Amino acid sequence: MSEPTGLPAARPRRILTQIAAVAWEHPADRAALQALRAVPGFDEVVKKVVGFLGERGIRLLFQANAVRVGPTQFPRMNALYADVLTTLDWPERPELFVSQTPFVNAGAYGMERPFIVINSGALKLLDDDEMRTLLGHELGHVMSGHALYHTLLVLIVNVGLGFLPFLAGMVLLPVQLALLEWYRKSELSSDRAGLLACQDPTASMRMFLKMAGGGDMKEMDLGTYLEQAKEYEESGGALDRMFKILNTLPQSHPFNTLRAAELDRWIAGGHYERILSGDYPSRGPQAEQRPLDKDIDEARDYYVKEAKAVVDDVVDTAKRAAQAFTDAFKKK
């Protein structure tokens, strides 16, 4: 099928020397993380999980049924992973595992020594550049320090209290909802890291398409999918927007259409090209001490735009209803 126009072309990959994670972090990600840390009881949950399981326990839990990637184990993925580590100039090599799971997904877990798990379904579905995008996405989580909180989310949502008796009696719903909101926003950050690791915008968008549809590109068209993503964001009235919010609340990931549209906006805003040209913050004290006020201001703009769209829809619906009511009386 035909590829879309309008996306920057792929180019020889540039090594982003000493790039700091703040270069790609979504402002709503950093703001949601601060909100998560302020949720009553959150610190206690972290202490109990870390204290009960510890680094070794968490690693054993997630690595129990997976194969460590190396030169003789999944050599194709091992080579692609080396490319990604080089491109993002990350000196450490978090352990990489493949787990026998047909559903295409991946995750970064752990505490002091984060590691990455790729579901086996991704090996068959994704080509090399799409796999670079996925690996870069997960390495982005590691570089941003997301692994611990992602581990907490998986334990609370998927493992449950039967395995975590030490959390019994704690009010977990506010923590769970805050974790989900933050993690959805952290995905938007790491989607950008995946693009920077791959440096092929078309391949990054194809990954979303394949994760949404599960088919090969002989049966799907990326340009049509990006139109669908735009339609999802822009169409519908107040009721549709309310259902979008409700449908998203229990999800750990934003819908793939939304992720594609959000990444496309970031590219169109010139951020991607600026980073490839060398205009990005380097790792070190300056990046680590970035003022939170800037993130909060940018995040406020992001959330205000979302809220304004809902309010505008409600006002528009009310105006149309009032006009219809007036027109009905005029006809009598």
Image (cartoon, helix red, strand yellow):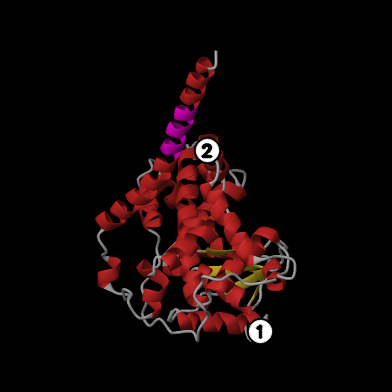
- On residue 75, the disc is 1
- Comparing 5 with 57, the one in front is 5
Query: Does residue 164 belong to the magenta stretch?
Result: no
Residue 308 location in percent, x, y? Answer: 39, 41
Quadrant location of the N terminus? bottom right
- Comparing 71 with 25, the one in front is 25
- On residue 215, the disc is none
Distance from the alpha carbon under mark 1 to that under mark 2: 49 Å
Query: Does residue 317 belong to the magenta stretch?
Result: yes
Residue 321 location in percent, x, y? Answer: 50, 25
| Residues drawn in magenta | 310-320
Among the 4 quarters of the image, the one containing residue 74:
bottom right
Q: Please give left or right for residue 156 compared with residue 21 in the image.
A: right
Tag 1's secondary structure? helix
- On residue 237, the disc is 2
Q: Nearer the viewer, mark 1 or mark 2?
A: 2
Q: Please give left or right for residue 2 compared with residue 238 in the image.
A: right
Tag 2's secondary structure? loop
Residue 227 can be seen, yes or no: yes
Pointer 1 local density, CA inside 10 Å: few below 14, some 14–19, many at least 20: few
In this rendering, the answer to whether 209 lies above or below 249 is below
Q: Sequence-wise, which precedes: disc 1 or disc 2?
A: 1
Pointer 2 local density, CA inside 10 Å: few below 14, some 14–19, many at least 20: some
Residue 30 location in percent, x, y? Answer: 37, 56
Q: At x 41% / y 56%, what residue is drawn?
A: 29
Q: At x 57% / y 67%, what residue is drawn?
A: 205
Q: Amino acid at mark 1?
A: Pro
- Comparing 148 with 74, the one in front is 74
Q: Main secondary structure of the magenta part?
A: helix
Quadrant location of the C terminus? top right
Q: Amino acid at mark 2?
A: Gly
Residue 41 location in percent, x, y? Answer: 40, 42
